[in-house]
Amino acid sequence: MRDDLRADLLEVGRLLVSMAEAVRTAMVHATQALLTADREICEAVIARDNEVDDLRRQVDQQVYDTLARQAPVATDLRLVVTGIQIAADLERMGDLAEHVAKTALRRYPAPAVPPELREVITSMGSVADRMAGKVGLVLTTQNALLGAELESDDDAMDELQRQLFNILLDRHWPHGAEAAIDGALLGRFYERYADHAVNAGQQVVYLVTGEPTEPPGLA
Amino acid sequence: MRDDLRADLLEVGRLLVSMAEAVRTAMVHATQALLTADREICEAVIARDNEVDDLRRQVDQQVYDTLARQAPVATDLRLVVTGIQIAADLERMGDLAEHVAKTALRRYPAPAVPPELREVITSMGSVADRMAGKVGLVLTTQNALLGAELESDDDAMDELQRQLFNILLDRHWPHGAEAAIDGALLGRFYERYADHAVNAGQQVVYLVTGEPTEPPGLA
C-alpha cells in the first residue's frame, strides 16, 4: 500500500476509534442515568450526541477525499468505503444511547426502571459496554477473533432481552402498561445497540479476511 | 459523464428501484397479514426478505465494481458510493416489514392488533406504503421535492405513533401488558420504516442538489 493512502486510512481509522469510544461512553452514562434517574447525566448524553454525528460527517468526508485523491483499488478500495458503513453503525449506537437517556428523562424524577428490571438492565448495560469496547479493539487490532466474540456477546444480549420480556409479561407484573412499554423499548434499544456493534465488527473482519460474513439478524 | 460510467450507474439505480419496490410490497403484505391474522402471508413476507438481502449484496458488488473500473471523481464518486447507503436503508425497511409479519405470526391464530388499534395501524400502513412508493419515485426521477414530501409524511407517521401510544397508555386499556408491548413495538417498526424512507430519499436529494441535508431524527 502506498504511504499516502496508508496515511489517509489511518485518519479514517482514528476517527472511527474516537466514534467507538464516544458511543461506548454514551451508553455507559445513559445506563447510569437510567438506573439513578439522574437528570444532569441524561442531558449530557443527549447534548453530546452531536459530537458523534459530527465525527460521522468527518469520516464520510475523509472517505470521499481519500477516494478522490488516491483512487484506491481492490482491498484498499473496500477498506476505504467500509469506513462509511462502520461510521453509520456507530452513529446509530450513539442514537440508541440517546434514546435510553431520553426514556430516563421522560420519567424524571420518577425512575424509569422499576426494581424488578434493575438487574437485567444492569446486565444489558454491561454487555453493551463490553461490546462497544471490542468494536474499538477490532478497529485498532483488526483481530478477527474479536469479531466472533461479538457474536457470542450478542447472543448473551438476546438472552437478556428474553429475560426482560419474561419479567414484563409475568402476570404478576405490578406496574401497568406504561412501565411495561418503557421496559420493552429499553430492551430493544440495548439489543439494537448490540446488533450494530456486531455489524461494525463484522465489517472490519470482512475487510481483514476478505471473506464475506452474513449480516447479523438485525432484529 | 462517460457512457460506461452512466451504464454502471443505471444498473445501480435499477437494483435500488427493485429493492424499493420489494420493501414496499413487503410492508403492504405485512400490514395486511397483521390486520387479518393471515399466516400464509406472514410466512411469505418472511421468506421473501432473502430476496431483498440478495439485492443489497448485488448493489454493494455493483458499486465496488464501478469504483474499481471507472474510478469516478467528484459528484459521480458520491453518487456511486451513495448507492451503498441507500441499499442499507432499503434493506432495513425490508427487515422491519419482516418484524411486523413475525409479530403477527407470534400471536397467530389470535390477532396481534386489538380493535382499538386497527384504525391507527391501518393509517401507519398507508403512510408507510406512500413513503416507500416515493422513495422509488425519487430514485427514478431524482425529484428533490419528493424528498421534502417524505419529511412531511414522516411527521404524519410520528403523529400516528403518538396516537397509538395514547391509546396504549389510556388507563382504560383493557388488553394488558403483552398487547400493549406488541402495540408499542409495532408502532416503532412503522416509525423506523418511515425514518429509513426519509434517509434513503435524502441521500438521493443530496446527490441531486449537492447540498448536504441533516440526517433525519432517527428516533
Image (spheres, coloured by chain):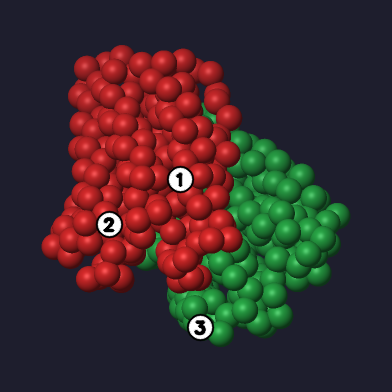
Chain colours: A green, B red
How would you rate the neighbour count of disc 2 (Cα within 10 Å): few for under 14, some for 14-19, many for 20 or more? many
The 10 Å Cα crowd at callout 3, few under 14, some 14 to 19, many 20 or more, is: few
Label disc, if present, on residue A171 of the rendered structure: 3
> Residue A126 at what x, y percent from top left?
66, 76
Q: Where is residue B78 drawn, in percent x and y?
A: 43, 28
**Residue A29 versus residue A125 in the image, above or below:** above
Report the Cα–Cα distance between label 1 and label 3.
29 Å
B2 left or right of A197 in image: left
Classify residue A172 by image quadrant: bottom right
Characterize the local packing of mark 1: few (<14), some (14-19) or many (20 or more) Cα atoms within 10 angstroms.
Answer: many
Please tell me how many numbered marks the rendered image carries. Answer: 3
Q: Amino acid at mark 3?
A: Arg
Residue that numbered label 2 is attached to: B34
Dot 2 lies on which element?
helix
Residue type for callout 2: Leu
Q: Is residue B123 above or below residue A22?
A: above
Q: Are marks 1 and 2 on the same chain?
A: yes
Residue pictured at 30% horizontal, 70% vertical: B107
Q: Kindly state the secondary structure of the residue where label 3 is placed.
A: loop
Question: What label sits on residue B191 in the rendered view?
Answer: 1
